[in-house]
Image: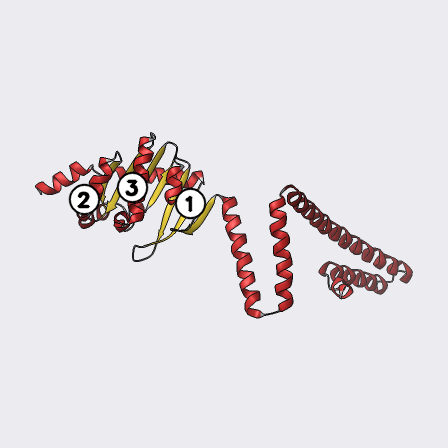
């Protein structure tokens, strides 16, 4: 099988074809047959040499990759154990040769690859209530500032989770953390959640209100900026419900969110200004 594949190599096929044609042409134009054959053989030899060099180059690259992988595994015992277990289980599943198991295994390995690659690129996508979401644990880790835009459905502020989150906001403020929250909602929602907004302002959060229909569409996002180094953004469904949470430490994304936050503040007012004006109107 290896021999067949070798002779099917395009480089070899082209090289041999050129050598044969060259030898035939030399014979047809009256050159010595032995010399023509020799030239053809030389061209064939050069072709084989090029092919060997190319294969050696590929082998060298594989050896370097294997060597690098070996060094990594040797320096990371936990990684070695995990990959060793996965390799053994992979072989076991392959031996079973059950189509459903094979497809599920491929999906699992692909998911693992995508998650790890995402982390290496500086972002993580997770369910909003998973153990890896920013949530409660994230607030505890804030060091200086927390700036958020409340664009998603705010109903969760009246749930036990929302109450816990508000409590953590208050504790963060007592630690010296500056918390700013822009409520980006329609007028009806801002009126219906006036008690929640007032409560948040009372614990020391800098609260600003902006009507969503009065702001540019590209600024209508639910996100949080943590210490100017982390961006937590909610991915929304068409119905406006929270779907996934994307956490990024990419400074380009963080800086863009900071610019959007600054722009949003131009459309926002303090609760006293907003409710006072609406009362008069």
Label 2 element class: helix
Residue 166: image tag: 3
Q: Circle 1 sits on which residue?
A: 247
What x and y, as percent, mark residue 269? 20, 38
Name the residue rendered at 64%, 41% in the picture: 75
| Disc 1: CA contacts within 10 A as few (<14), some (14-19) or many (>=20) | many
| Disc 2: CA contacts within 10 A as few (<14), some (14-19) or many (>=20) | some
Which quarter shows the N terminus? Answer: bottom right
Label 1 element class: strand
Residue 106 sits above or below residue 184 on the image: below
Is residue 220 at least partly visible in the picture?
no
Image label count:
3
Residue 204 sits above or below residue 215 on the image: above
Q: State the CA–CA distance, disc 1 to disc 3.
A: 21 Å
What x and y, as percent, mark residue 274? 16, 40
Q: Nearer the viewer, residue 140 or 150?
A: 140
Q: Earlier in the sequence, mark 2 or mark 1?
A: 2
Residue 239: image tag: none
Q: State the CA–CA distance, disc 2 to disc 3.
A: 15 Å
Name the residue rendered at 35%, 41% in the picture: 224
What x and y, as percent, mark residue 203? 25, 35
Q: Check contact, mark 2 vs mark 1: CB within 8 A.
A: no
Is residue 250 at least partly visible in the picture?
yes
Q: Earlier in the sequence, mark 2 or mark 3?
A: 3
Name the residue rendered at 70%, 50% in the picture: 62
Q: Check contact, mark 2 vs mark 3: CB within 8 A.
A: no
Q: Circle 2 sits on which residue?
A: 194
The answer to whether residue 164 is left or right of residue 38 is left
């Amino acid at each position: 099988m290896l021999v067949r594949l070798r002779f099917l190599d395009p480089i070899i096929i082209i090289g041999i074809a050129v050598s044969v044609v060259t030898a035939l042409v030399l014979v047809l134009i009256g050159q010595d047959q032995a010399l023509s054959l020799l030239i053809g053989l030389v061209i064939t030899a050069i072709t084989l040499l090029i092919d060997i060099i190319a294969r050696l180059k590929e082998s060298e690259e594989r050896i370097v990759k294997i060597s690098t992988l070996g060094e990594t595994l040797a320096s990371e015992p936990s990684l070695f154990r995990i990959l060793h277990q996965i390799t053994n289980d992979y072989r076991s599943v392959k031996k079973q040769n059950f189509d459903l198991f094979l497809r599920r295994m491929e999906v699992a390995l692909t998911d693992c690859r995508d998650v790890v690659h995402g982390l290496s690129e500086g972002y993580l996508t997770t369910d909003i209530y998973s153990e890896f979401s920013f949530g409660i644990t994230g607030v505890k880790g804030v060091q200086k500032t927390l700036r958020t835009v409340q664009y998603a459905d705010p109903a969760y502020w009246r749930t036990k989770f929302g109450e816990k989150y508000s409590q953590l906001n208050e504790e963060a403020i007592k630690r010296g953390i500056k918390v700013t929250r822009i409520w980006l909602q329609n007028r009806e929602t801002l009126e219906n959640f006036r008690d929640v907004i007032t409560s948040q302002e009372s614990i020391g959060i800098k609260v600003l209100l902006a009507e969503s229909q009065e702001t540019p569409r590209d600024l209508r996002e639910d996100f949080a900026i943590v210490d100017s180094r982390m961006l937590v953004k909610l991915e929304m469904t068409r119905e406006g419900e929270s779907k996934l949470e994307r956490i990024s430490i990419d400074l380009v994304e963080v800086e863009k969110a900071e610019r959007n936050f600054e722009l949003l503040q131009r459309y926002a007012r303090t609760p006293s200004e907003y409710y006072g004006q609406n009362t008069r109107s």
